Image (spheres, rainbow, N blue to C red):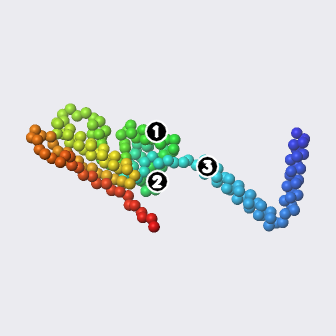
Amino acid sequence: MADQASVLSDVRFQFQDFFGALSLTKRITILVALGIILIGMVSMIFVANRASWAPLYSNLEPADAAAIVEKLQENQIPYMLAPGGRSIMVEPHLVDRARLTLAKEKVLPGSGVGFLDLFSTPSLGETEFQQGVKFRVAQEGELARLISTINVVKSAKVSLAIPQKTLIFRQSGGSNGGNCAQSYQQRSRP
């Protein structure tokens, strides 16, 4: 124990001799350099311990973002809206849980009404025509959602024109349909 105390006092005396022999400008330079190093280390520790965020969904329509944020608040999942409100970020370890929770609550991004929306509740008094219309609307909604998942497509709307089956055979060209997809602007690089 006495050896450790003598070693520490020797180191202290050597430091005092070294620091005392320096000029005033060198002392100030060393203290400023040590201060900068200390501030840099503290800021690195602060940045390393800051919460990181991963995208849950991006390029959302405002209505979709509002519905998703509402469900995240109900389920107490911390989130952060990116500037512009079109992207929702969550902590990286909660991304899968958030997506599963939103799927369970039937809150999915994308325009249109899909099969889950129209056929989740049974309707006993529906006619065959009403069921056919619901089926066609669900098909259009699901196709629009599918097309919207393509990276270069911003939004999509699908309209199907499916011919009716009749007893009289007519020669036709098959099913017709139309879709409208709005894409992101491509920037040309020189």
Residue at (80% x, 63% y) in the render: 27
Amino acid type, residue under disc 2 in the picture: Ala
Residue on which the image places disc 3: 48
C-alpha separation, residue under disc 3 versus residue under disc 1: 24 Å
Residue on which the image places disc 1: 97
Q: Earlier in the sequence, mark 2 or mark 1?
A: 2
Count all numbered tags in the image, as a single digit: 3
Kindly state the secondary structure of the residue where label 2 is placed. Answer: loop
Residue 62 showing in the rendered view: no
Kindly state the secondary structure of the residue where label 3 is placed. Answer: helix
The C terminus appears in which quarter of the rendering? bottom left
| 10 Å crowding of disc 3: few (<14), some (14-19), many (20+) | few
Residue 121 showing in the rendered view: yes
Kindly state the secondary structure of the residue where label 1 is placed. Answer: helix
Report whether 8 appears left or right of 95: right
Tell me residue 26's x, y (percent). Answer: 80, 64
C-alpha separation, residue under disc 2 versus residue under disc 1: 20 Å
Residue on which the image places disc 2: 82
Residue at (90% x, 45% y) in the render: 6
Q: Earlier in the sequence, mark 3 or mark 1?
A: 3
Amino acid type, residue under disc 1 in the picture: Arg
